[in-house]
Amino acid sequence: MVNSCYPMSIDHKGKDDSGLRPVYAANSNSSIVRFSAVEKALLFKALLETTTEFRHQIRLFSPRSSLYVLYRQYVYDTNAGYPCRGGIDFFFIDVKDGNTYPCGYRGNENLGRYWDMDMNARDRIINDCRLCDWECFRDPSELFGPILNAFHRPVDLMRKFFRDTKYFKLWFDDLRYYLAYDFFNGRLPPDFNRMGMSGKNPALQGSEQ
């Protein structure tokens, strides 16, 4: 099972305590992982095309719908896709002291010790965060976004569907792919017959003709 998540270069917070401050160790100021907006767009486009080509051969965790909106986010639509649910459904816990944060890159928002948190008192309103590209949080936020939309704002979901049918085609294909692979249960070996059914496997296509 492969995920295309990669280390990021995150600028530290400004003097006004805004922006991001990493507490997650997968962060570096090295130019190797420091990309411009144009480079990020090309990177996500390449990842989208690569997963399309190889996801029938190996289990690729990264949903194409998420890669697609991250690409769009850096090309022309800064509000593409669904906002991150970090601090709502997902949290980052620092192992050295047990402090909890909305995600590994929002270290300026310390929520206190995990065992002291009252989850019932947490504000469930999304703060529309798209400040980083951390796929560990962005991917599940994207996958669950349309489902939550259907329950809470169905009209908005229909508008999005007709506005960007390509996105929803990728999203439905991601769901089909995840179902075919038992939601990437690492305790089960890959079923290569099902993998061929979940993508365009040239070898299987030739045998079917």
Image (tube, grey):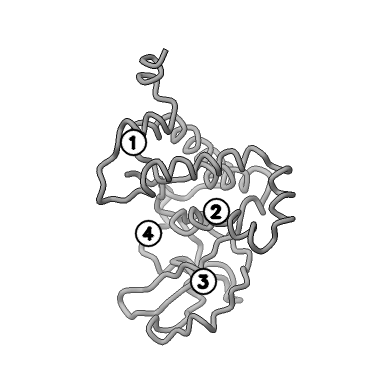
Residue 142: numbered disc: 2
Q: Amino acid at mark 3?
A: Gly
Residue 97: numbered disc: none
Front residue of 110/160: it is 160
Q: CA distance from mark 2 to mark 3?
A: 15 Å
User: Is label 2 or label 4 in front?
Assistant: 2
Q: Check disc 4: other Cα within 10 Å, few if <14, some if 14-19, many if 20+.
A: few
Q: Position of residue 41 (x, y in %)?
A: 56, 42
- Name the residue rendered at 41%, 87% in the picture: 116
Q: Is residue 167 left or right of residue 182?
A: right
**Image height check: is 88 above or below 112?**
above
Q: CA distance from mark 2 to mark 4?
A: 22 Å
Q: Amino acid at mark 1?
A: Ile
Q: CA distance from mark 2 to mark 1?
A: 22 Å
First in sequence: mark 1 vs mark 4: 4
Front residue of 161/69: it is 161
Q: Check disc 2: other Cα within 10 Å, few if <14, some if 14-19, many if 20+.
A: many
Per the image, label 3 sits on a secondary structure element best described as loop
Front residue of 79/116: it is 116
Q: Amino acid at mark 4?
A: Ala
Per the image, label 1 sits on a secondary structure element best described as loop
First in sequence: mark 2 vs mark 4: 4
Task: Identify the residue position indicated by label 1 in the image.
Answer: 58
Location of the C terminus (image quadrant):
top left
Q: Amino acid at mark 2?
A: Glu
Q: CA distance from mark 1 to mark 4?
A: 25 Å
Location of the N terminus (image quadrant):
top left
Q: CA distance from mark 3 to mark 4?
A: 19 Å
